[in-house]
Image (tube, rainbow, N blue to C red):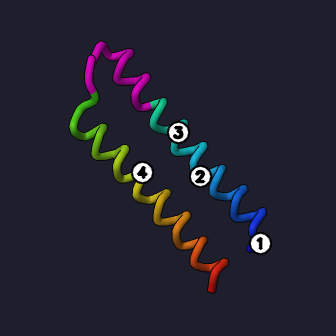
Amino acid sequence: MDCIEKIDSDYLAMAELTKEISSLVQKSLNQGNKELTPSDIEHILKMTDDVTLKIKSKSQEITV
């Protein structure tokens, strides 16, 4: 994977993460909640961690 492909892949992963978080927040607001539930927050943290690990592992592939 070259540098341009990595940047494209990272951008796509971040865009998907943003879309998922936005959807989760909008759903919560539509349900009349003023705050996210603990399970929503856990889900956001898990998704963020997954994307971060994906980006880090691809960075290591390029530098190795």
Specify the label residue 2 is tagged with: 1
Q: Residues within 10 Å of mark 1 (few under 14, many from 20)?
A: few
Specify the label residue 22 is tagged with: none
Which residues are drawn in magenta?
A: 24-35
Residue occupied by mark 3: 18
User: From mark 2 to mark 1, how far is it between C-alphas?
Assistant: 17 Å
Q: Is label 4 in a helix, a strand or a loop?
A: helix
Mark closest to the chain's N terminus, 3 or 2: 2
Q: Residues within 10 Å of mark 4 (few under 14, many from 20)?
A: some
Residue occupied by mark 2: 13
Specify the label residue 47 is tagged with: 4
The residue furthest bottom is 64
Amino acid under label 1?
Asp
Q: Position of residue 21 (x, y in %)?
A: 45, 36
Vertical comparison of 29 with 63: above or below: above
Q: Is label 1 in a helix, a strand or a loop?
A: loop
Amino acid under label 2?
Ala
User: From mark 3 to mark 1, how far is it between C-alphas?
Assistant: 24 Å
Report which quarter residue 24 is drawn in. top left
Mark closest to the chain's N terminus, 3 or 4: 3
Asked if labels 2 and 3 touch by Cβ distance under 8 angstroms, the answer is: no
Q: Residues within 10 Å of mark 3 (few under 14, many from 20)?
A: some
Amino acid under label 4?
Met
Residue sitting at 47 percent across and 60 percent down? 52
Amino acid under label 3?
Thr
Residue sitting at 75 percent across and 64 percent down? 5
In the figure, is residue 62 to the left or right of 24?
Answer: right
**Was residue 38 drawn as part of the magenta stretch in this picture?**
no
Vertical comparison of 61 with 33: above or below: below
